[in-house]
Image: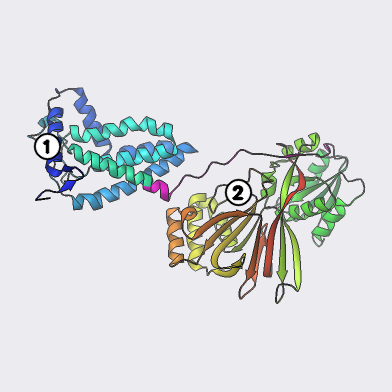
Amino acid sequence: MGSKLRWGHWDVRNVARLDRAIVRAVSRWPEGRHDAVWKNLSEAATKGKLWFAVAGVCAAIPGKPRQAAIHGLLALGVASAVTNLGFKTLLPRTRPLPEHLPVFRFVNPQPTSSSMPSGHSASAVAFTLGVALVDPRLGAVLAPVAAGVAYSRVHTGAHWPSDVVLGSAIGAGAALLTRKWWPARPPVPDTDRSPADAPAVGDGEGLSIAVNALGGSYSPDTETQLREIFPKAYINLISDGDDVAAEIQATAGRPGTKAVGVWGGDGTVGAAAAAAVEHSLPLLVLPGGTLNHFARDVDARSLEGALKAAKTGAAAWTDLGHVSAGRGIDGKDEVAELIMLNTASVGVYPNLVRRRERLQPAMGKPLAGLVAGLRTFGAATPTTLLINGVHHKLWILYIGRGRYYPRDLAPLTRPVLDDGVLDIRMVTADEPFARLRLLWAVLTGTVSTSKVTHLSEAGKISIEAIGEPLVIAVDGEPLPGVRTAEFTVRRRALRVYSPLA
């Protein structure tokens, strides 16, 4: 090898000779307006000003542009740190001198840090490729600008060409690396409904409605409004002191009932779903109560939507989750059989959601989720239990009836109602330094790709408490004292009115 350092099949001297040859070729270009263009472009990209401005514009556009801007800035941050804190220290190099280029072209003042590698090029390529990996069309628009920034560093005498090449390679590597750390969310599939037969009950004839007056959105006008919309319907107002489940059963069992309607939150809707299945009736969900996740998923977000489906008899099949929860000393003394419309959870998930919802009006959802996660996981202790016979320590066990999106710890929507799966998401404490890993993932927004996060699907899952009995939240309703529980899916068990069916 002698006294030479090798870079692949090129040695340092060959690279230096090529650098000087390229710079000489650039120096022979006549002076013109283009010199000001390259100078201004180079200055605009200093300290990432150009890319932050582009990111600000993209962030104002929801969807792919906003996601692309976030990924671009993440990549830029990694590339900038690696270049300025790492490579420039390890690879000291003198920048081009006035003897190599005309003085009028030189950037003023010329940077004093190491010439190798080009930080401008690293940031330009990192941001642009980070954007392109999310939104290729936007990346294609930015690519000529990034190439111009990289070339401007040679044109203005700030860097040698090999500095630009190495900086560009670092930027590309940073974009690919951050793309692995912060992968794009899979696209949400289109809403799909499996049509089911149901009678048209637009004027309310044959429709029996259970109204839970204890629901959060109930008011004296609710009953009046429902009677105006469904003048021939039977309406059972459930008041304080009534047995909600028994009243709903009585409503569904009323002679002449062709369909059962329900006004209330998810807990009330769950009881109505069980009654509808037992009496082989379609269910009309009317938006009311404090939580209406199921109403949202069946597209009954408003009374107008529910009325449209009722008038036309538009209905769809939906799966139901079934929970068999054993309580008592050995989990066999008392067995509770529950319908699960939406989700169940064990661990700190309910506390996390409550904290996030409380903070969200003031902070917005992303920041509220971060603060809620740090507070919750910082103070919580993991739960120990058996999952399908396997010992786990975990922070969260989340079970969704049906596949939810996005595929992380903030599931929001369920486009298919009869896919036959349980959506299982676990955040475990089995790994070394689990709490630190989890807090780091929450801080960096990488919970979905962290080694403490496990996403899977199944048609059945069983859990068993080790030590203290569990509290399981089923559709937001806590069920304490659980020793064992089994979750299954009942395929196409319920017909529900839906305007999109």
Q: Residue at x 84, y 48 (%)?
A: 280
| Quarter of the picture holding the C terminus | top right
Extent of the magenta region: 177-204
Along the viewing direction, whichever of 319 and 142 lies nearer the viewer: 319
Along the viewing direction, whichever of 465 and 238 lies nearer the viewer: 465
Evaluate whether residue 60 shows in this view: no
Q: Is residue 374 magenta?
A: no
Q: Residue at x 9, y 35 (%)?
A: 98
| Label 1 crowd bin: few (<14), some (14–19), many (20+), radius 10 Å | few
Query: In the figure, residue 29 lies in which quadrant?
Result: top left
Residue beneath disc 2: 404
How does the figure colour the protein chain or chains? rainbow
The residue furthest left is: 99
Q: Secondary structure at mark 1?
A: helix
Image coords of residue 171 (percent x, y): 31, 43
Residue beneath disc 1: 17
Query: In the figure, residue 111 lies in which quadrant?
Result: top left
Q: Residue at x 42, y 54 (%)?
A: 444
286 vs 345, left or right, is right
The residue furthest front is: 1
Please state which of the two labelled residues, at mark 2 or mark 1, is closer to the viewer.
Answer: 1
Amino acid on which the number 1 mark rests in the picture: Arg
Q: Main secondary structure of the magenta part?
A: loop
363 vs 461, left or right, is left
Query: In the figure, residue 436 lies in which quadrant?
Result: bottom left
Image coords of residue 165 (percent x, y): 24, 39
